[in-house]
């Protein structure tokens, strides 16, 4: 083909391009005027514009087009055709943008298409982008709202082009950036006008005259970063940073370096406006795992450092959200996050927040978002412990470690316990908490503590489930032995932790042990009142272990009990522990109270003796025989201690008589022995004759008869109250109590019949009737006999008030000898017989 024919073919192709562009414009504008869904409308238009773009900017340059003409006229025609093609493309964009600023996003796509293929006329593309932005910046001034979410990404593309080697492209990019920033400024001004404009930090700095900004932006990345950082709102700034970050892994190394430099500059001063921190950190991890070049690796790690300055919590949480143990890449990122001392306190605060979690807990326990590292469990605390092993030895963290030593110490003590109890342990052993504790000790000048713990085999045993209590004691004890300088801060933090209350009950156990040992080392008993108050509160903690530890410490202070200011409150808290559901706590409380009472000042003792005595009464019917025995015996000891104040205790003694009598039939010999012991003391307190019948092989019914006679003679008015107390035992699950209570009710009602009203007898008959169906034959037989006694008493009653009063007076002066009512033989009375009971000496009693 001749040169002329070739030129004609190219000229024809220009006409084809012109025709196609006209058709495309018609289609685009017709879609723009239709009622198609806006999203579908934009996607369709963008697809057509992409085709137009590739067609328009694939044509030769203007010089080459002019060479197609044979003469001047043809060259002018071709030039006009060339300009018409570009103008149609540009006009199409202007029309779209004039209708909707959202379609500025097309310019962002054009910049991307331009960079994908360097054969396109980049200069001409930049001219069109700049003109459209210029048009939009003028038009936007009359808008009441601006919707241009693409500005961040487009700003990133233009900012990189501002450093292009081609001066023409650089100049156009600078003007484009200028117009873009004007739009962004207007958008920001419209947003802030709804609030207080004085709070806006997105205006151009005073040192920059916006009229001269295009010249300033050319090739000066620091000025670009300063302008962009102060004008773009956070959402646009985030897009800007993300776009630059994605360029770090671009094949074009020159472009990647420019992006790295600009990214560093923007994050140095404006990283606070970046909201997509976690996504960037995650992307950096992926890029670093893909063997990035050394320069890009350093650039990405620098991004981690800069993001940590203003968003330490987001960065650290993301870094902890990877499987443990951490790989080398993650450790590099930890080091980058912890490279500056200014953010060390915030990093440690975030890690301490994570360490509040328990390994193995369900996800979402610390944050609302779904964790991606593990599907069902939270392993972030384990990752945080491993991270501390990397961060704490860093020189930049020395001051922060000293500041947070108590918090780190206790958090790691808790984590050691959690790790040793993790159900997740299979073949993996995640004991980074103990490694972190060793690092903490060595970074805090406590190397000797570490060495001593090693000699005591602490580090080898600390991971064992049953060792943690003793292990906690060892750490506290060893710290105390070396008079660790952090003691004041640690004690203050332990007190704060104790007052606020830890998140878990097992944390309380560790706190109590640690605090107790430190106080034992540095204070003499009794503790300062504020700390003693903690132990008083812990007595009734929901965790039985905490209660017992507190009671144990309080018990050890018996020798100085009288030096305590609020001794009454302390004793009352111990009595409150009697209601614990854990029997070991109740037993410890009984022992502690008894030990303190042995040393207590008698004046204070006497002021509380009635309340203390009353607190023993509910325990006399406790399900545990050991507790029943202790409560009964301690009740007797209290009566013996207070023998000079028996007048204060007579009502409580009478209240305790019913269980003391009934539990003489207890199947546990300890309880029986305690009842005998205490009943003898009660007899003395009530000024009764000695109960000589409480011998080894005593007869229960005769003891009841003896005691009831004494009750009638000394405290007859209490008989109805005692009967009421007995009725509750008729529903007991223990057979011996049902038997004994029927006998005691029978004697009390017979002796006090003159005190009972007809309604009282009806109640007693109804109660006995319910026992007729008892599963035990002896109970049924005793109930039948008692029912007969009550019927006889009922028949003797009169409705006349005068006759009833006369009968009561007569019963006080008339005494008659009677025989036992039941001839009852206890199962344990192997040597007794009915004949022996009939020959027993009768006793005086009131009819």
Image (spheres, helix red, strand yellow):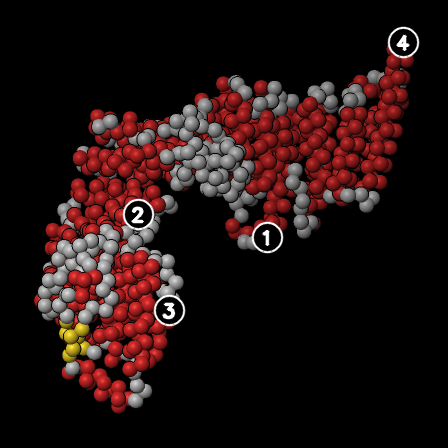
**Residue 331 can be seen, yes or no:** no
Mark 4 or mark 2: name the one nearer the start of the chain. 4
Q: Residue at x 46, y 42 (%)?
A: 365
Which quadrant of the figure has residue 249? top right
How dense is the environment of label 3, judged by Cα within 10 Å: few (below 14), some, or many (20 and up)?
some
* In this view, the mark in front (1 or 2): 2
- The residue that disc 2 covers is 544
> Which numbered circle lies on residue 193?
1
Q: Is residue 76 left or right of residue 311?
A: right
- Determine the secondary structure under disc 1: loop
Q: Residue at x 20, y 44 (%)?
A: 519
Mark 1 or mark 4: name the one nearer the start of the chain. 4
Question: x and y percent of residue 115 in the render?
Answer: 67, 24
- The residue that disc 3 covers is 769
Mark 2 or mark 3: name the one nearer the start of the chain. 2
- Determine the secondary structure under disc 2: helix
- The residue that disc 4 covers is 1
Which quadrant of the figure has residue 397? top left
Q: CA distance from mark 4 to mark 2?
A: 102 Å
* In this view, the mark in front (4 or 2): 2
Q: CA distance from mark 4 to mark 3?
A: 129 Å
Q: Residue at x 53, y 30 (%)?
A: 282
Mark 1 or mark 2: name the one nearer the start of the chain. 1
């Amino acid at each position: 083909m001749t040169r002329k024919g070739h030129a004609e073919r190219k000229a024809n192709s220009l006409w084809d391009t012109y025709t196609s562009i006209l058709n495309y414009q018609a289609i685009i504008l017709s879609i723009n005027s239709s009622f198609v869904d806006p999203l579908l409308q934009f996607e369709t238009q963008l697809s057509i514009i992409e085709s137009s773009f590739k067609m328009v900017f694939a044509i030769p340059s203007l010089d080459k087009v002019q060479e197609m003409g044979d003469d001047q006229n043809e060259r002018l025609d071709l030039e006009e055709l060339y300009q018409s093609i570009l103008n149609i493309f540009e006009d199409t964009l202007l029309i779209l943008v004039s209708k909707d600023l959202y379609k500025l996003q097309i310019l962002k796509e054009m910049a991307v298409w331009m960079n994908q293929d360097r054969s396109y006329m980049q200069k001409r593309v930049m001219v069109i982008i700049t003109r459209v932005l210029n048009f939009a910046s003028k038009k936007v001034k009359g808008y009441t709202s601006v919707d241009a979410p693409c500005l961040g990404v487009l700003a990133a593309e233009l900012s990189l082009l501002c450093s292009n080697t081609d001066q023409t492209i650089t100049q156009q990019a600078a003007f484009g950036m200028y117009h873009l920033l004007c739009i962004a400024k207007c958008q920001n001004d419209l947003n802030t006008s709804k609030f207080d404009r004085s709070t806006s930090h997105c205006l151009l700095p005073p040192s920059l005259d916006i009229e001269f900004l295009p010249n300033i932006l050319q090739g000066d990345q620091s000025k670009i970063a300063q302008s962009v950082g102060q004008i773009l709102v956070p959402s646009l700034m985030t897009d800007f940073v993300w776009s630059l970050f994605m360029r770090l892994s671009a094949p074009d190394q020159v472009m990647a370096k420019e992006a790295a430099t600009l990214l560093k500059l923007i994050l140095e001063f404006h990283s606070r406006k970046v909201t997509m921190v976690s996504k960037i950190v995650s992307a950096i991890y992926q890029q670093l795992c893909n063997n990035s070049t050394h320069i890009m690796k350093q650039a990405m790690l620098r991004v981690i450092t800069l993001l940590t300055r203003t968003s330490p919590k987001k960065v650290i949480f993301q870094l902890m959200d990877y499987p443990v143990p951490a790989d080398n890449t993650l450790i590099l990122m930890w080091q980058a996050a912890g490279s500056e001392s200014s953010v060390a306190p915030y990093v440690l605060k975030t890690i301490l927040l994570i360490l509040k979690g328990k390994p193995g807990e369900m996800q979402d326990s610390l944050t609302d978002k779904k964790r991606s590292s593990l599907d069902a469990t939270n392993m972030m605390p384990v990752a945080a412990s491993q991270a501390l092993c990397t961060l704490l030895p860093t020189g930049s963290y020395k001051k922060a470690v000293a500041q947070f030593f108590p918090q780190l110490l206790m958090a790691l003590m808790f984590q050691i316990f959690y790790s040793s109890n993790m159900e997740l342990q299979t073949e993996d052993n995640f004991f980074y908490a103990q490694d972190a504790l060793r690092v903490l000790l060595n970074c805090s000048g406590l190397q000797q503590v570490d060495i001593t713990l090693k000699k005591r085999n602490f580090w080898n045993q600390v991971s064992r489930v049953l060792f943690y209590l003793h292990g906690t004691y060892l750490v506290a004890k060893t710290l105390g032995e070396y008079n660790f300088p952090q003691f004041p801060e640690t004690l203050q933090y332990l007190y704060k932790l104790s007052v606020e209350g830890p998140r878990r009950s097992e944390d309380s156990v560790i706190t109590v042990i640690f605090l107790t040992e430190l106080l034992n080392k540095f204070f003499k008993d009794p503790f300062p009142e504020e700390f003693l108050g903690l132990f008083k509160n812990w007595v009734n903690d929901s965790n039985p272990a905490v209660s017992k530890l507190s009671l144990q410490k309080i018990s050890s202070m018996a020798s100085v009990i009288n030096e305590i200011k609020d001794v009454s409150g302390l004793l009352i808290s111990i009595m409150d522990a009697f209601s614990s559901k854990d029997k070991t706590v109740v037993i410890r409380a009984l022992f502690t109270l008894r030990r303190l009472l042995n040393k207590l000042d008698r004046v204070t003792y006497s002021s509380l003796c009635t309340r203390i005595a009353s607190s023993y009464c509910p325990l006399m019917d406790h399900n545990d025989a050991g507790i029943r025995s202790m409560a009964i015996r301690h009740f007797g000891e209290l009566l013996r201690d207070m023998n000079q104040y028996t007048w204060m205790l007579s009502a409580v003694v009478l209240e305790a008589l019913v269980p003391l009598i009934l539990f003489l039939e207890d199947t546990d010999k300890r309880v029986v022995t305690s009842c005998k012991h205490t009943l003898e003391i009660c007899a003395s307190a009530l000024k009764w004759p000695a109960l000589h019948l409480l011998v080894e092989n005593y007869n229960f019914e005769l003891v009841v008869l003896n005691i009831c006679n004494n009750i009638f003679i000394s405290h007859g008015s209490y008989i109805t109250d005692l009967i009421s107390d007995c009725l509750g035992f008729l529903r007991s699950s223990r057979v011996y109590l049902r038997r004994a209570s029927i006998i005691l009710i029978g004697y009390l009602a017979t002796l006090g019949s003159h005190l009972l009203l007809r309604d009282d007898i009806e109640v007693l008959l109804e109660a006995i009737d319910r026992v007729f169906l008892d599963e035990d034959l002896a109970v049924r037989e005793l109930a039948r006999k008692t029912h007969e006694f009550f019927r006889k008493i009922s028949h003797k009653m009169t409705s006349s008030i005068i006759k009833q009063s006369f009968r009561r007076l007569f019963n006080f002066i008339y005494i008659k000898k009677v025989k036992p009512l039941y001839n009852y033989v206890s199962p344990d009375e192997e040597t007794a017989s009915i004949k022996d009971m009939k020959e027993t000496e009768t006793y005086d009693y009131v009819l």
